[in-house]
Each structure stands twice: as structure tokens, then as C-alpha cells.
Image (cartoon, rainbow, N blue to C red):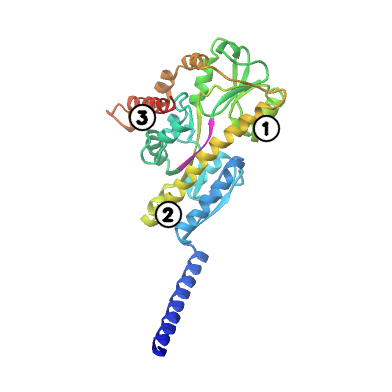
């Protein structure tokens, strides 16, 4: 009995020594990561920042401390384009950006109006390695030295203004509308307001509030979160739920850095990315409902809800076939010669739309 007890004590001591060694090694690894990355977000995103920090924490956990990511929210590292060029050169490793075609020549497919109308369609079209928009957008980013990790969105775009409710294209008469470098969306607004005397002005997103408050422009496209978090509802009187485009932001990493990672570290990053993307979609749906309720109670601010028939008129006037031909087809045909890829993308997006619609019936 004594001998057995002695063996147990020796075994316990050996186990403790091994355990202590493992813990010391683990602490040393976490204190000395192999990779130290920066992750920048150019815009203010209070509803999303906590999840971006979670992503950083999960990567550290799943990589067992071999990767450390420091998060820089709210434009701390500069403007959108400065973030883009920083990750392209590798001075910043990860950023949240969007593929404006002046930066990503193949990025126009991300901005074609009336392709994605709700979160369920976005999940399918941008599903990592499977969704049609993931595949094409990934190829576009690869050309400029980046790799996509996951997506986050702010939902569907509507159009707000200070003059009148917008229920028909004719209601854009003589309005001055703010637009951005999202050329596909610009073309749609141009086509909707053609012949009405509407004019467009390109103004940075961060200056929309001031431009509206000072009367520089009469209106701008916006989103439910932006109406609250960017306070657009304070300087708009009417907001039409046009749902003519979907906001998708891409979290990307320098491709050379990504390609050099070992497979186990890639797996760790992808695991964290998938978990956080799922949470971001859930948060976006929850917060959109909260924002709509909050905005419905704002005095002096009116939400114009369109019927499917009213929205169809705007869709028709947008003339998306011409937008596809001008902005998307040239790059697509060059990238995928002889594959009729433009038509394949359109057919897949139509299939996704019908699949989601059938599930809601």
C-alpha cells in the first residue's frame, strides 16, 4: 500500500513537471508571437468594432499565440484609400475596404445595383470559396495583391432627401444628390433621375452630414445604421427604402503575407473569420430592426416604404443591363475568356434570388 502510494506521488510529480513545462512554453509562445499584424478600419463602425476585436482575439487563441493582431478602428490609420494602399504594400496587414474600381479594376461586380436585396442573398452570394460573388471578388482582389478573409455589411441602400417623399423616379426632379466612387450605384441613380433635372455631386462619406445640413446637396443614398450612427436622420426629412444596392465591406489581408502562412495558421485565421462573419450577419439583422424602430419615432423624419410594384419601376429605370455591359463585362471577359462568365454570374444571382424568395413564401 505504501509502495503504491509512493508511485502515485512520483506520477503526480512527473505530471506536474510536464504540465508546468507545457504552460511555460505556452506563455512564452503567447508572449513572443511569430507574427504581429495591424488591422485597420477606415470608418466609424460602433456596432461592428467589438466583433473585429473578437476576430483578433480568436486568431490569437486558435493560433496558440503565434499571431497577434492589434485593432485600429475609426480611421486611426487614415482614409479608406490610405488603408487600401497600406495593406497593398504590407505596412498594414489587414484592413476593411471596398473594391472601388479606381483601386480594384475587377471590383465593379460588388456595386451592380439590384443584385443583392437582403441578408439571406448576401450570405449565399458571398459564402467563402463557394459564393459566386466571393469567387469573382476574390480574383479581383488577388490582382491587386490581396486575399479576402470575410465580409461585413451595413444592409440595403435607400435614398434620403430634404425636399419631398420619393415614390417615383419623377420625384427626383431638380434634386442635388450626393454620390461616391461606387460607379455602378452612380449609374443607377443617373438613369433613375434622367430627364428630371437632377444633378449629382461626388462627396466623401464623412462629409455627407455637413453637405446635407448646409444645403450643398438635397439628398444622398444611405443605410439604416448610417441614419442613426452617422446621424443622417438629423439632416434628412425623408428616406425611401429603395433597397437598390447592398453594402458589402471586405476584410482583406496582404496576399503575399497570406500565401507564406503555414496551413495550420491559415486554418486558425479562417476559423476565426467564419465565426465572426456569422456573428456580424446576426448583429446586422438585429440592429437593422432596432434602427427601423428607433427611426420610426423620430419627429420630422419620414420613412417611405415602397410596394414591390413601386420598387419595380425604379429597377426598370436603373437599366442594369447597361451597367453590367459598361462596368463589369470588359474585366470579366478579359479575366475569364470564352467562359460567358457575365451571363453565368447573372444566372447564379437570379437563382439565389429565387431560392431565397421561395423559402420566404
Residue pointed to by mark 2: 268
* 128 left or right of 103 in image: left
* 119 left or right of 224 in image: left
Residue pointed to by mark 1: 231
Asked if labels 1 and 3 touch by Cβ distance under 8 angstroms, the answer is no
Q: Where is residue 145 in the image (x, y as percent from the top left)?
A: 42, 44
Residue appearing at x 47%, y 68% in the figure: 26
Front residue of 150 and 120 = 120
Front residue of 121 and 115 = 121
Q: Is residue 235 visible?
A: yes
Looking at the image, is mark 2 or mark 1 earlier in the sequence?
1
Q: How far apart are marks 2 and 1 (CA)?
A: 37 Å
Residue appearing at x 49%, y 54% in the figure: 58
Residue appearing at x 38%, y 29% in the figure: 331
Split into 4 quadrants, where in the image is the C terminus?
Answer: top left
Q: Where is residue 251 in the image (x, y as percent from the top left)?
A: 48, 43
Question: At numbered mark 3, what does the secondary structure look like: helix, strand or loop?
Answer: helix
Asked if labels 1 and 2 touch by Cβ distance under 8 angstroms, the answer is no
> Eyeballing the image, is 11 above or below 335?
below
Q: Where is residue 276 in the image (x, y as percent from the top left)?
A: 49, 46
Q: Quadrant of residue 240?
A: top right
Residue pointed to by mark 3: 332
Amino acid at each position: 500500500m505504501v509502495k503504491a502510494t509512493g508511485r502515485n506521488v512520483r506520477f503526480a510529480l512527473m505530471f506536474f513537471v510536464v504540465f508546468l513545462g507545457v504552460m511555460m512554453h505556452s506563455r512564452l509562445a503567447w508572449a513572443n508571437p511569430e507574427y504581429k499584424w495591424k488591422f485597420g478600419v477606415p470608418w466609424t463602425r460602433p456596432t461592428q468594432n467589438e466583433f473585429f476585436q473578437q476576430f483578433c482575439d480568436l486568431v490569437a487563441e486558435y493560433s496558440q499565440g503565434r499571431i497577434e493582431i492589434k485593432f485600429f478602428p475609426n480611421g486611426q490609420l487614415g482614409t479608406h484609400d490610405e488603408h487600401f494602399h497600406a495593406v497593398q504594400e504590407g505596412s498594414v496587414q489587414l484592413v476593411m475596404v471596398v473594391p472601388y474600381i479606381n483601386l480594384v479594376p475587377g471590383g465593379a461586380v460588388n456595386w451592380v445595383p439590384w443584385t443583392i436585396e437582403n441578408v439571406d442573398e448576401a450570405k449565399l452570394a458571398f459564402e467563402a470559396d463557394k459564393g459566386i460573388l466571393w469567387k469573382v471578388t476574390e480574383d479581383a482582389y488577388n490582382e491587386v495583391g490581396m486575399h479576402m478573409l470575410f465580409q461585413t455589411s451595413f444592409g440595403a441602400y435607400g435614398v434620403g432627401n430634404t425636399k419631398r417623399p420619393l415614390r417615383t423616379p419623377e420625384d427626383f426632379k431638380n434634386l442635388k444628390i450626393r454620390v461616391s466612387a461606387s460607379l455602378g450605384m452612380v449609374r443607377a441613380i443617373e438613369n433613375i433621375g434622367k430627364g428630371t433635372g437632377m444633378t449629382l455631386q461626388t462627396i466623401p462619406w464623412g462629409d455627407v452630414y455637413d453637405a446635407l445640413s448646409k444645403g450643398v446637396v438635397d439628398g444622398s443614398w444611405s443605410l439604416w445604421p448610417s441614419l442613426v450612427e452617422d446621424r443622417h436622420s438629423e439632416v434628412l426629412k425623408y428616406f425611401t427604402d429603395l433597397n437598390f444596392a447592398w453594402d458589402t465591406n471586405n476584410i482583406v489581408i496582404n496576399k503575399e503575407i497570406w500565401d507564406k502562412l503555414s496551413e495550420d495558421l491559415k486554418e486558425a485565421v479562417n476559423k476565426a473569420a467564419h465565426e465572426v462573419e456569422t456573428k456580424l450577419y446576426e448583429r446586422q439583422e438585429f440592429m437593422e430592426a432596432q434602427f427601423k424602430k428607433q427611426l420610426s419615432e423620430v419627429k420630422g423624419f419620414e420613412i417611405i416604404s415602397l410596394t414591390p410594384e413601386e420598387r419595380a419601376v425604379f429597377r426598370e429605370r436603373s437599366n442594369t443591363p447597361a451597367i453590367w455591359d459598361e462596368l463589369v463585362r470588359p474585366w470579366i471577359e478579359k479575366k475569364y475568356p470564352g467562359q460567358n462568365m457575365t451571363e453565368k454570374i447573372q444566372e447564379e444571382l437570379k437563382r439565389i434570388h429565387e431560392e431565397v424568395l421561395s423559402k420566404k413564401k
